[in-house]
Image (cartoon, rainbow, N blue to C red):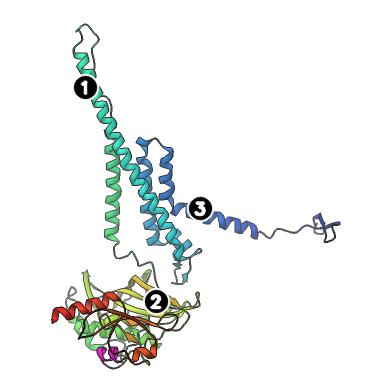
């Protein structure tokens, strides 16, 4: 049987009615409608602190603490959601799949600020309702007690032939108030315990790259792993951290192999890795796959700020360290160059293998249309800072952070001198900067700290 086609009447350009085939529904409209519904539901869930608080206006004032408690519980869920990037990752912050590929949020990261504001208003309303209900219940309880005492006194003056009066106190709202305080105590106890065990993971789910960042520092040792470092580590106790210099050599070589395309995860990572970036319980083979499949963060490069790596703690057989990196790359999805600072945590086992590598914090995130290249002047830090060479990158004298130009190619810096240790601000071009013979700093705080140190030493 031939396919049947439905026909309908439509007006043509001249206003005449014609019988034409009915346009079939491709289903795109339903998909768009479903997506809109999903987004609205997700937004409603992550803004529950506000909606639950607003419900309090529909409640009796003495019962509004229920709305307040609900708002606090919803806030706790919102914080957990941000950490795990469930709804907030889908809508705003973006997320990484099992292969480490990063996907942008549907709405955009900047728009989450409106959610923070809405939830902040909701929590403030919730706390107000809790305090209001507490005070009203307390006042009602005091009034009931006063009425009871008056009735008891009047009853005692009556004849013994009168009906007996019960000596039991009327029910008050004190039990409700105690229940409220108990629930709040449990909520905050859970929150404290949760964040105590997860304080190092708050920013972990905010990776800035899918592969390791590249270090442009020269190689210390051409071997994949420093042999002397291996010998020293094998002779140490598990809870004794290796020296700063040895660890710096090891991590520098690690980044050097990545930048020279000689990286093999087996040379650096343990057979069982606790965490790599945001991927948990992984292997060197998986880490190699993440590096090879990266197509979002292009030509990533980094500088260990101040060449400083700090020992943090020992857990079992693993020594944990953290340090800061200045990272820049080309973001394919944004078609812009990215620059930021990243705080990295690394765990080293007794065999000098990386057991954990993750990004704890990302700050100073900037996007530009111009490529950022980090090239260190081979001269000493103070000389290259004062007598700046335009062929190299300018570094902050105090923190050793790269100082980069703005979108107009201008350097907005702070400066000072030995003769006059006071902070001053100036905006210069790249050529003008080379003739500005002062100590240069990235921020006012850095400049002030150097000035204070200088004054105290004098």
Q: With respect to residue 230, does 316 lie above or below?
A: above
Q: Nearer the viewer, residue 290 or 117?
A: 117
- Residue located at (48% from left, 80% from top): 369
Dividing the picture into quadrants, the one containing residue 366 is bottom left
In space, the residues marked 3 and 1 are separated at their CA atoms by 53 Å
Q: Nearer the viewer, mark 3 or mark 1?
A: 1
The C terminus lies in quadrant? bottom left
Q: Nearer the viewer, residue 326 or 124?
A: 124
Kindly tell me whether residue 55 is visible in this rendering. yes
Secondary structure of the residue carrying numbered label 3:
helix
Q: Nearer the viewer, residue 181 or 59?
A: 59
Characterize the local packing of mark 3: few (<14), some (14-19) or many (20 or more) Cα atoms within 10 angstroms.
few
In space, the residues marked 2 and 1 are separated at their CA atoms by 76 Å
- Residue located at (28% from left, 50% from top): 188
Q: Which residue is mark 3?
A: 41
Dividing the picture into quadrants, the one containing residue 161 is top left
Q: Which residue is mark 1?
A: 149
Q: Earlier in the sequence, mark 3 or mark 2?
A: 3
Q: Is residue 353 left or right of residue 418?
A: right
Q: Is residue 384 magenta?
A: yes
Q: Which residues are magenta?
A: 378-387
């Amino acid at each position: 049987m031939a396919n049947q086609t439905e026909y309908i009447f439509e007006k043509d350009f001249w206003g005449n009615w014609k019988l034409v085939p009915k346009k079939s529904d491709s289903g795109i409209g339903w998909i768009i409608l479903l997506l809109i519904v999903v987004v609205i539901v997700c937004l409603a869930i992550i803004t529950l602190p506000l909606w639950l608080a607003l419900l309090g206006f529909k409640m009796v004032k003495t019962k509004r603490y229920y709305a307040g408690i609900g708002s606090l519980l919803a806030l706790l869920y919102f914080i957990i959601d941000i950490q795990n990037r469930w709804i907030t990752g889908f809508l705003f912050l973006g997320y990484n799949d099992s292969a480490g590929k990063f996907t942008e949020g549907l709405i955009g990261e900047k728009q989450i600020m409106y959610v923070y504001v809405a939830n902040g208003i909701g929590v403030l309303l919730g706390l107000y309702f809790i305090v209001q209900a507490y005070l009203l219940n307390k006042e009602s309880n005091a009034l009931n007690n006063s009425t009871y005492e008056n009735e008891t006194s009047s009853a005692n003056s009556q004849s013994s032939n009168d009906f007996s009066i019960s000596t039991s106190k009327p029910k008050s709202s004190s039990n409700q108030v105690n229940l409220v305080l108990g629930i709040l105590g449990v909520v905050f106890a859970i929150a404290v315990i949760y964040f105590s065990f997860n304080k190092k993971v708050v920013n972990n789910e905010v990776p800035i790259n899918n592969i390791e960042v590249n270090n442009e520092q020269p190689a210390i040792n051409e071997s994949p792993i420093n042999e002397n470092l291996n010998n020293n580590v094998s002779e140490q106790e598990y809870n004794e951290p290796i020296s700063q210099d040895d660890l710096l050599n090891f991590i520098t070589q690690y980044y050097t192999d990545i930048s020279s395309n000689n990286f093999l995860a087996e040379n650096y990572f343990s057979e069982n890795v606790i965490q790599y970036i945001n991927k948990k319980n992984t292997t060197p083979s998986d880490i190699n796959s993440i590096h090879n499949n990266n197509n979002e963060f292009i030509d990533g490069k980094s500088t260990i700020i101040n060449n400083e790596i700090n020992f943090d703690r020992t857990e079992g057989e693993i020594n944990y360290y953290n340090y800061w990196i200045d990272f820049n790359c080309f973001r394919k999805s944004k078609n812009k160059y990215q620059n930021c600072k990243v705080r990295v945590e690394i765990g080293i086992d007794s065999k000098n293998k990386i057991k954990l590598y993750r990004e704890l914090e990302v700050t100073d995130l900037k996007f530009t249309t111009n490529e950022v290249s980090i090239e260190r002047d081979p001269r000493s830090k103070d000389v290259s800072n004062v007598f700046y060479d335009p062929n190299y990158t300018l570094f902050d004298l105090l923190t050793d952070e790269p100082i980069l130009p703005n979108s107009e190619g201008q350097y907005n810096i702070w400066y000072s001198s030995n003769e006059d240790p006071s902070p001053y601000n100036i905006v210069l071009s790249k050529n003008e900067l080379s003739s500005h013979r002062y100590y240069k700093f990235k921020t006012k705080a850095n400049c002030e700290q150097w000035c204070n140190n200088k004054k105290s030493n004098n």
